[in-house]
Amino acid sequence: MTNILDDFVKKMFRTLTGTEADANIIKRHTSNLEDVGEISFPLLSKCWSAYIDDETDVLVRKFDESDRETTVKELCDSLVYRIFKIRRYKIVKDRAYLYLERQPVYLHAISAVVAQKFDYGRSETLKCVISVKLDGPDTVDDLSALRMSLIKTIVENLLKFVTAKNSDGAKTIVLSQTADGDSILCGAVINDGGVKDTDRSVSDFYDKRIADLRTMSRHRLGVQVSEEHFKKLAEASVALEMLANKPHKCIKIPMDGVNKNSLFVVYNYARLCALLKEFDSRVTRGIYPAIGDVKDIDFDLLDRREEWELVYVYVLQFPAVIESCIGDIESGVINPQHLVTFLINWSSLFSVYYNKCRILVDPRVHLFGLIHARMCLINGLRWVVHNSLRMLGIDPVTQM
């Protein structure tokens, strides 16, 4: 899958400098989009000096002139790339902030994820087949070994997503708990004393998590669920906790309690599934009309700031998150923690949206367009989060 946002930013860079570079001087924003726009860049030519020739007459040289408005407008008028078009801009001090047209982005992102489902985020950027091995026995007899096993699982799942079908060559990477120049270091799970935790067995640790979840369910949720359900929740919670930090860093995980961020991710995924199930039920009962072709959805009806951020950051940029996790693996660098951070941030934003916005509103004719637009958004998010959880080795829980 082509990362079209990356391509758009590269085109912007070429327009400004006349050169090609993999530079971060053009920022892609992931929060507070109503205020700062989706993209911004500095308006001082000295900031761009590393990317331009002294003799070249390029657009960035005009930033130090008096009429910056004309220069930024010239850029915006020339930047039409596939689904991206600048709808407005603002200049604050020495920085330009660009705001994208939303309807084409909504349509592209949601159409792509709904059409591709399990394959959304897949690319063929890696041309070499890479296998992953553990340094030592495959037995998971302590928490540090469990963490290394979980890291192996996510790396293998990510590799499936980015490896080309017609790959040339093969390579093996080794995960190890000891520093070795030829392997990727996996930090230990440490105790309160700062040393490797060897006192807690894996089975005892999972049993304690299940017991804590059972207590939480009884005292807070007020519902009775199966032991298999608690087992899945415990496995999800532990995986998210252990993968939340950079692989080479040690991590401390408390014996008591459940990490709320981890559990919240699973809980909000279940919310997505519940909304979709209830919508389908209402369609079956004739309360709502069925959703037709996504191309006919009026996404301009999605006017809440959370809705735009959920699509621009968490649907459109999901393929880029996958790439950031695994793109440097041939250099011995992996970043599975990026996917965990992505899920935790998504969960926080979606929870705000869910609590502020009644999604399945009364069945009034003038509201059906809005209901359909929101349910397309929910369905797109469902596939993004589902694919994220499966790559982390987590069996998604559809109800809490």
Image (cartoon, rainbow, N blue to C red):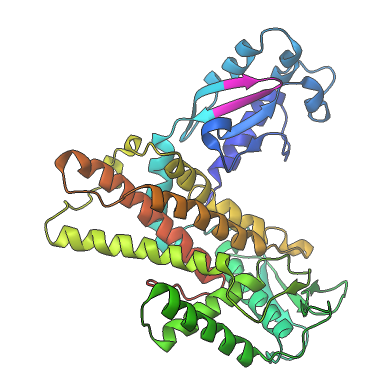
147 and 93: which one is in front? 93
Q: Which residue is drawn at 56% across and 74% down?
A: 237
Q: In this view, does 354 lie above or below 370?
A: below
Taking the view exactly as shown, the residue that stands out farthest to the left is 286
Q: Main secondary structure of the magenta part?
A: strand
Q: Quadrant of the C terminus?
A: bottom left
Q: In this view, does 283 lie to the left or right of 97?
A: left
x, y (%) of residue 26?
67, 34
x, y (%) of residue 306?
45, 44
Q: Which residue is drawn at 45% across and 72% down?
A: 396
Q: Does the magenta segment cover residue 143?
A: no
Stretch in magenta: 90-98
Q: Does the magenta segment cover residue 91?
A: yes
Q: Is residue 2 above or below residue 173?
A: above
Q: Is residue 50 in view from this perspective?
A: yes
Q: Which residue is drawn at 78% across and 69% down?
A: 248
